[in-house]
Image (tube, rainbow, N blue to C red):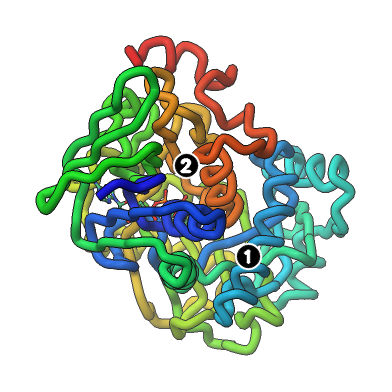
Amino acid sequence: MHYDTIIIGIGGMGSAAAWQLAKRGQKVLGLERYDIPHAHGSSHGISRIIRLPYYEDSAYVPLLHRAMELWREAEAASGRELMVTTGSIDASPEDDPLFQGALASARLHDLTHEVLTGTQVNERFPGYNLPAAHRALFQPQGGLIASERAIVAHVEMAQALGATIHAREPATSWEAGPGGEGVTVVTDKAKYRANKLILAAGAWIGQLAPELKNLAVPERQVLAWLQPHRPEWFVPKTFPVFNLAVEEGRYYGLPIYDVPGFKFGRYHHRGETGAPETLRHEPDAQDEALLRQFGERYFPAGSGATMALRACLFTNTPDEHFIIDHHPRHPQIILASPCSGHGYKFCSVIGEILAELATGAATQDIGFLRLGRQGLSGAVERVAF
Ligand SMILES: Cc1cc2nc3c(=O)[nH]c(=O)nc-3n(C[C@H](O)[C@H](O)[C@H](O)COP(=O)(O)OP(=O)(O)OC[C@H]3O[C@@H](n4cnc5c(N)ncnc54)[C@H](O)[C@@H]3O)c2cc1C
């Protein structure tokens, strides 16, 4: 019952951390409250976007390069397709931070890219129907990650290296040992001890680390898959993943992949926040209407019959950047995963970073993701860690 590291939450981040720790010869226990994988958290819905010219902050780009290497490594090691290259489009009115941020990021990090008008995007990728004057940054290395399959792959690879993973065993509490030494984790079934604990509980992290409650706020999202009238325009070879700012809001979308429909969603869908258990799981007619309206206007050739709708959870921080850090009072505990709706693409590299933090190894420059960063000042001070 004694482990080097316990991971609470075997979703996107936790499963990647399990593999990385097992690769380092660690004795690992992963605890997951639901199935592996499951559709209650943040990582379901088949696919997620990966894109390099990061308009949110250029500081993510080095992490993205490493994330891509690690996705390819995980593909090779697991024999499963995990990353599909489609190219990425970041499009908005010219002066919008989405296009400007993507352009700045591409220039700063010398990323291959092209700047196109809305009209040029529509000509080259006929599934699109962008406003003519929009500006788009096309970057050829972007694509999608098979998110649920990647969780399975990471878990299988961790298990093959000796990791113990228990599904349907929620952690009910944990207690840190004195002086930064050791931790005890309690479930309904047993009590486990470890040297280190990683809290990768996604939308539930505020329940396990109450100090994070106001810094990591769950929000309901809904995804739609619509049957294209011209399916050949919506496959990975012809349809780059997109982030798009339009007058209705900010949206993202991906080609047909494992569901017979092209997929998209709206950031901060209807602004519904709350504890994960209180957020409605079942999409309704209003969710569908909101998404269909967008699809029919900007992707008319893609917006036939509804094929699927699914609700999913964001976990938002005040500045919408991640929180990856040691617990301020208990250095043997590592906080991961409030990823504000854009974290999946990073799971491979965050898994590596978590393993490095847990083993005391040098890691990447993640100052902009730590609790002490400027973007959280004020918010963190109000929390009694
Ligand atoms: C609709 C939608 C679209 C998105 N699109 C993109 C995208 O295109 N690109 C991108 O990069 N990101 C995207 N994201 C964000 C990304 O999916 C998330 O950042 C990522 O999945 C978070 O992973 P996680 O490991 O933190 O959470 P999860 O995968 O949810 O894992 C947390 C796990 O912890 C478990 N858990 C919780 N409490 C306990 C407990 N007490 N005991 C045991 N287990 C527990 C949960 O059951 C869960 O399995 C999207 C998110 C949503 C919702």
User: Residue tagged by mark 1?
Assistant: 71
- The mark nearer the N terminus, 2 or 1, is 1
Based on the displayed image, in which of its 4 quarters is residue 327 positioned? top left
Q: Using the image as rendered, state which of residue 218 and residue 333 is in the foreground.
A: 333
Residue 156: mark = none
Residue 340: mark = 2
The reply, left or right, for residue 86 in relation to residue 256 is right
Quadrant holding the C terminus: top left
Confirm or reject: label 1 Cβ below 8 Å from ligand 1.
no
Q: Is residue 60 above or below residue 42?
A: above
Q: Kindly report the distance in space between the C-alpha atoms of the residues bearing marks 2 and 1.
A: 21 Å
Q: Amino acid at mark 1?
A: Trp
Q: Using the image as rendered, state which of residue 111 and residue 383 is in the foreground.
A: 383
Q: Amino acid at mark 2?
A: Ser
Percent of width and height locating residue 222? 36, 59
The reply, left or right, for residue 157 in relation to residue 163 is right
Q: Secondary structure at mark 2?
A: loop
What residue sits 35% from the left and 47% below the top? 3
Give the number of the mark in front: 2 or 1: 1
Confirm or reject: label 2 Cβ below 8 Å from ligand 1.
yes
Can you see residue 301?
no
